[in-house]
Amino acid sequence: MISTGRSQDHVDGLLQSIENGKLAAAGEDLFVTRRNSNMPIEMIFTDCQGLGVNREHEQWWVLPISSKDAKISANTYLWVLPLNAESQELSWNIELHDGTVSATKTEAGLKVSLNTDRATIHKSEARPHSDPFNHRFSLKITGGKELEDALAAFYWGTMLPLVVEKTMAANFPYSSGYVLSTLKVSSYAGSYPAVDHEFQIKGRLAMGSELDLDVVRRMIEMQLKLMNDDPERLSRAPTSVQPDGKREYHVRRNSKDNRQNAAMFPLTGDIEVMEEAWHYYEARKDVPWLRSNIENLEHAAAWIEASIDQYGRVWSDVYYEDQVIKDGRETQAQAFAAYAFGLLSNMESVLGRQTKAASYSGVSRKIASALTELTPMGYWDEKNHRFVDWIDRNGKIHDHIHLLANALPVTFGYATPIQANAVSQLIAQNDKEFERFPSFLSADIAGYDNSEIGDGGPYDLSAAGRYWYWDAAFRESHNQNKLLFNQLEMVAAEGMKNNYFMGERYDMDHVYYIDGKNAHGAEQYYEYPNVYAAVLISKFLGLSIPVDADVAVAPHITSYGSVELGTPQYALRYSYDKDGFVLKNLSDRRRRFKVDLTALSAASPHYQLPKGTNSRAVGAGSIITLAPREEARWILAR
C-alpha cells in the first residue's frame, strides 16, 4: 500500500473540504469519523472522476459517475480518481463498514455525502494497481512498471466506466448486462453483443474480480435474453441493442462500389456466446448456472447448424470485419465454429449429457475437417500454401494473406502438420506487415478492391484489438515470448499518448489513411484496453482459470523477476531466477495449480521439486496442491 503522508485533519490533494467529519491517520490509511450523528459527512473533491461499488441482490455492481449532475449511491466503496491517469495526486478509496455513500458529479468534481459513523480511506496511485476491492497486482519484471501502469489505467479509465447497467442504462428496456463500446456515447450509445461482448468478456475474465465476473455473467445473460426475444424465434444474436430497446438482428451492407452486399455478423454472436459461457463456467465452476442456460446455448447451436451445408462448411458471411464485404463462407468463422461446438460438447459433458456431448463433438470434427480440405471444397490453398480468407457465393476465392484465417486453424489444433508448418513460415515472413501495430488483419491490405471494402470505408483494413487477441494466442502457442512483450509494450506506449484512452482502429498512417493520425474510428473505445488486459494476464503472465484446477500458471515472461496478483481468483505470487521458479499460494484456502514452465526456456528444462512437496525430478509441466500460504520451488536441474 502507498503511504499517504497525511497528518490528522490535513486536507489537500483532490479533497478540498470536509464538513461534519474528522480525518485521522492510522498507519498507511486514513479514517473519517462523523462528528454529529444526525448529519452526514460532506466531502468536496475537485478535478476528479468517481465510481461506486454496490452489493445488491447477491451480486456486485459498478456505478461509474460520468456526466454532470449524475448521482450514485453505493453501500461498499466509493473510488475518487484524478482526471489525469498520470497525475501525481493519489486516488481515494472510501470503504464503508456500514451505511451508504452518495456522490454527485459537479462542474468542479464530486460532492460526496457519507451516511455512516466511520469509514476507512485507502490511498492508491492515480489509477490504482488493484481491483475494485483493493486487491493489488505487481509486476517486478523487465518492463513491468510500464505494463502495470497501462493495465491499471485501461482498467480504471475505460473498462470499469463502460459498465452502465445501473447508471446510464438503469431505465433502458435491456439494462442488466448493458456495457458500452465507447465512452463517447455521441458515437455509439448501444451495447453490441456481436463481436464487442466477446472481447469485453475476455478482458473482464482476465481481471478476475468478483465484480468483473458478475458483469460477465450478466452480459452473457443479456445476450441469451436478446436471442430469446428474436422476433423470428430463431435465437439469433443481434448485432446491437440500442438505448430505446431497438435490436438489430439483420443488418446488410453494400460494398463501396455498390456491386456487392453482405450480412453483418449473422452467426458471430451465437458462436461467441458458447465460448463465453464455457470460460465463465471455468472461472466459477457454477454448474447450476450452466444447467439453467444449456438450452439457450443449444438454441444458439441450432441457428449455426442451419447455416452448415452437407459438407460441413459454414456459410457465415461477415464474422469480425463489418466494413469488409464477405458474402459466403469465411475461414476464420469456420475455425471459430468448430472451436465453439467443441466447447459446447464440453459443457454437455459437465452436465452428464453424453449423447448431446457426442453429437456436438461430431459437428465440431466435421467443421474442422472441412476447414483443412483443399479449395474449392475446403479452405486450404495448396498452390500458395495458406488458408484463404473467404470464398464468395459465386465460388470466387478472396485472399489477401489474412492473419486469423491462417493463425486460428493452427492455434485450435485443426491444421495438419504440413499446414501448420507452412502457416508458421507464412506469418513469420509477413510479420513486418502484421506487427506494424498489433495486429493488422492481413499482410496485403492494399490489395482489397472497392467490391470488398464496405460503403463505410476501409477502416477495418487496419490493426484492431480483436485481431491482436488471436494473434497473441498464436504467439503464446508458439512460445514467442519476446514478440508478446513487444506487442504489449507498443499498446501501452500508444495508450500513454492520450491519457490511456485508445481508438477503435490503428492504421499507423498506412495505405488508406494518410492524414498524420494513428487512430481512426470511435474514440475512447473498449477494444484495446480489454484485449490488453487479456493478453497481458492470460498470455504473457500466463495466468488463467482452467476447468480442472483452481489456477493455471504458464508464464511467457522474458526476464527474471516476480509477479503477484492479489485478486482472490488468482491470489498468488511467482518468481523466476537463474536457479528456478517459486510459486506461493496467497489464498487462505488449499488450492490446486497446473504449472507449465516450458515457455521460460528455449531448451527442455527439468526441475526438481524439493523434499516436502515431491523429491522426484519433473518436467516443466506439473500439477501441485498448495495449502494456504504454502509455496513450492522448482529447482532447475543441472
Image (cartoon, rainbow, N blue to C red):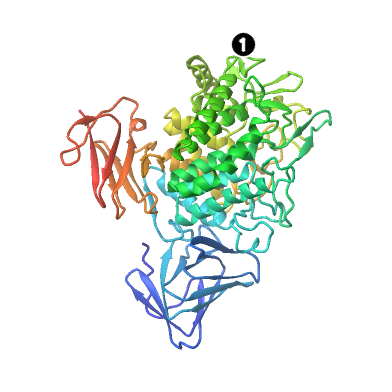
Q: Secondary structure at mark 1?
A: loop
Q: At x 51% / y 55%, what residue is drawn?
A: 214
Q: At x 43% / y 46%, what residue is drawn?
A: 285
Q: At x 60% / y 49%, what residue is drawn?
A: 526
Q: At x 34% / y 30%, what residue is drawn?
A: 598
Q: Is residue 447 left or right of residue 426?
A: right
Residue 578 pos. (x, y %): 26, 36
Task: Please state, as top left, top right, bottom left or bottom right, where the C terminus lies in the image.
Answer: top left
Residue 328 pos. (x, y %): 72, 26
Up the image or down, 361 lies above or below 299; here it is: above
Up the image or down, 503 lies above or below 417; here it is: below
Residue 261 pos. (x, y %): 79, 31
Q: Which residue is mark 1?
A: 383
Residue type indicated by callout 1: Lys
Q: Nearer the viewer, residue 268 or 155?
A: 268
In terms of image quadrants, where is residue 636? top left
Q: Is residue 109 visible?
A: no
Number of dots carrying numbers: 1
Q: Nearer the viewer, residue 155 or 335?
A: 335
